[in-house]
Image (tube, rainbow, N blue to C red):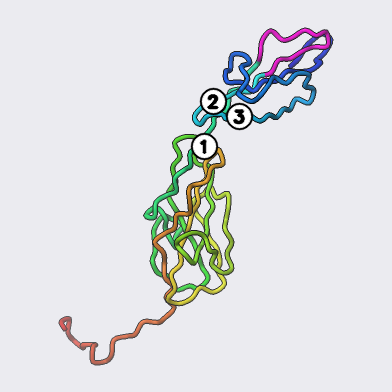
Amino acid sequence: GTTSGPGIRDYSVCFSTVNSGCTNIAGTVTQTGNTSRTATATATGMSHGSTYYVCVMTYDNAGVAASSWQCSDGFGIDTALPSNPTITDLNDLSVSLVDADWSNSTTALSASWNAGTDANSGIRDYSVCFSSVNTGCTNIAGTTTQTGNTSRTATATATGMSNGTMYYTCVMTYDAAGNAAAGWQCSDGFTIDTSAPSAPTGANIFDLSVSF
């Protein structure tokens, strides 16, 4: 607050259920004599989907109070978990939303995925794990779980995936309230193939003919 008179003395602060004054949120009380311009409190059960406010009353050194409480634009409570993208939304070995099932590299990893969903506070970001299992996150050797991803693409370098083994891209979704999805969503997987194919034998190659 400001004053052209004797200056600001202190503030009262109220965590409120309304933005038109001070109606204390259950479990809180109005804090008076505040000079730090910071405040904390512990409520006893705010409700999912409800909006609450921080309201301040300013006092000058003459003891005169502002004409009314000034309340914030509010904050919402979101306790609902976001939803991960589905298995078909996860694309192995591609940063352009094109899924691949095979790779001849034992080190190169990439992935891309469509957005998860959250009907309340919205999606904040993702954690992504290049995994040796499809039931959670077990990091492929040489990789670590990448957090705070907002691009929905990821790359990594493994230290030796094995020929004939299947690996997965797994994603965890977080909403703007900090809630995590119920578990990891993993892709349908990709397999490492470093074995060279066999050419047809001479007897299977036909000169001067387009028929078999």
Front residue (pair 11, 207)? 11
Taking 100 as reference, is 183 left or right? right
Span shown in magenta: 56-69
Image disc number at residue 44: 3
Say which label, 2 or 3, has the lower sequence index. Answer: 3
Q: Are marks 2 and 3 in contact (CB under 8 Å)?
A: no
Q: Are marks 1 and 2 in contact (CB under 8 Å)?
A: no
- Residue 58: x and y in percent read 74, 14
Front residue (pair 162, 4)? 162
Say which label, 1 or 2, has the lower sequence index. Answer: 2
Single out the residue that lies furthest toward the left: 211
Q: Tell me the residue that label 2 is attached to.
A: 51
Residue at x 75%, y 25% (from the top left corner): 37
Spatial CA distance of label 1 from label 2 is 13 Å
Say which label, 3 or 1, has the lower sequence index. Answer: 3
- Residue 31: x and y in percent read 73, 21
Q: Tell me the residue that label 1 is attached to.
A: 79
